[in-house]
Structures are given as structure tokens and as C-alpha cells.
Amino acid sequence: MTGRGFTWRQALKEERALSAAQLAAVIGYLAGELAGRARGRAREAESLARHIRAAEQRVQPITEEQCDQFFEGDYTAALLAAHQYAWFDGLDEVRRRLIICLEFNMGPRVFGEFKGTQAAIQAGEFDEAVHNASAAGDFISA
């Protein structure tokens, strides 16, 4: 915004005092900018809502039997993935269930990246395994 040689951005950079009229003009400009952004975000949200409604109309519900089949397939895949670790059978029942749960929810590819956690489990260092699993750098641990 400029007017009579005034650039409010330049005035702020130079830490010059603004007159009441200039300050009111800056506030008006910024309010307009914010309102424009809000309108743009509202349009984006409305567009997203339309896409979601359209997708919901195309979705076909599944039966209880299909749901059970999907679960059984996913659970079997998680169980097989858990058994790939040589140390899995040496764990107690609760820890085996935990590994199966992790495989089920994370998937073998993601859980496979938790090298530090796996090494700690294999060594029986379960507190360390928890620490490694919650550490951001576990993906690159050896």
C-alpha cells in the first residue's frame, strides 16, 4: 500500500513513527488481507467438503462377512510377518501379542525400520526397546 510517498513496510523497516491516518490505513490494509485469506480458505474447505460428499456417494458399504475376511487377511499377514524374526518365538505370550499388534498396525515395512527396537527386543532389553521405539531416530538406528 502506498500513498503520498508513504510505504508502510518501509516505514516499519526504518522504525519511523506512523501518523494516526497512516496507522489506520495499515490496519485497514492488513484487515483486508486477512479477510481475503479467510475467504480463500473458506472456498478451499467448501471444495474439499464437496469432494468428500462425492466420494461418500461412491463408497459401497461392506458386509460383516467382508469385514471379517479383511481382518483375517490382515491378521494373518501380521502373524506371518512377526514370525519372520528369529527371536519372536522366544518371547512370552504378552510380548508376542505386542509384536503382532505392531505388525498389524504399522505393517511389516514400517516396523521393519525400527532396527534399534528390534535389536533391544532380541537382546531382552525391553526398557531399551521402549525407549528406542519412542525415539525419533529409531528409523536409522543399527
Image (cartoon, rainbow, N blue to C red):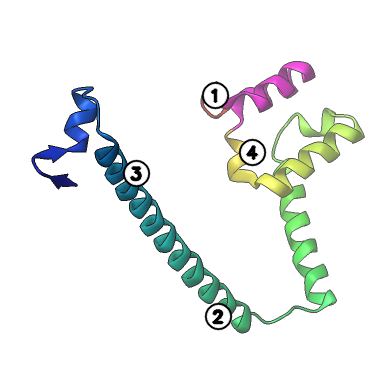
* Residue span colored magenta: 114-137
Which numbered mark, 3 or 2, is in the foreground of this view? Answer: 3
Name the residue tied to disc 4: 111
Q: Are marks 1 and 2 in contact (CB under 8 Å)?
A: no
Label 4: few (<14), some (14–19) or many (≥20) C-alpha neighbours in 10 Å: many
- Label 4, secondary structure: give it: helix
Name the residue tied to disc 3: 27
39 and 94: which one is in front?
39
Query: Could you tell me residue 121's position as x and y percent?
Result: 74, 23
- The amino acid type found where label 4 is placed reads Phe
The disc, 3 or 1, on the residue closer to the chain's N-terminal end is 3
Which numbered mark, 4 or 1, is in the foreground of this view? Answer: 1
Q: Chief secondary structure of the magenta span?
A: helix
Query: Could you tell me residue 18's position as x and y percent?
Result: 25, 31
Residue at (64, 38) in percent of width and height:
111
The disc, 4 or 2, on the residue closer to the chain's N-terminal end is 2
Using the rendered image of the protein, determine whether residue 81 is visible from the camera's viewpoint. Answer: yes
Please determine whether, in this image, residue 106 is positioned above or below residue 128: below
86 and 1: which one is in front?
1
Residue at (60, 27) in percent of width and height:
115
- The amino acid type found where label 2 is placed reads Ala
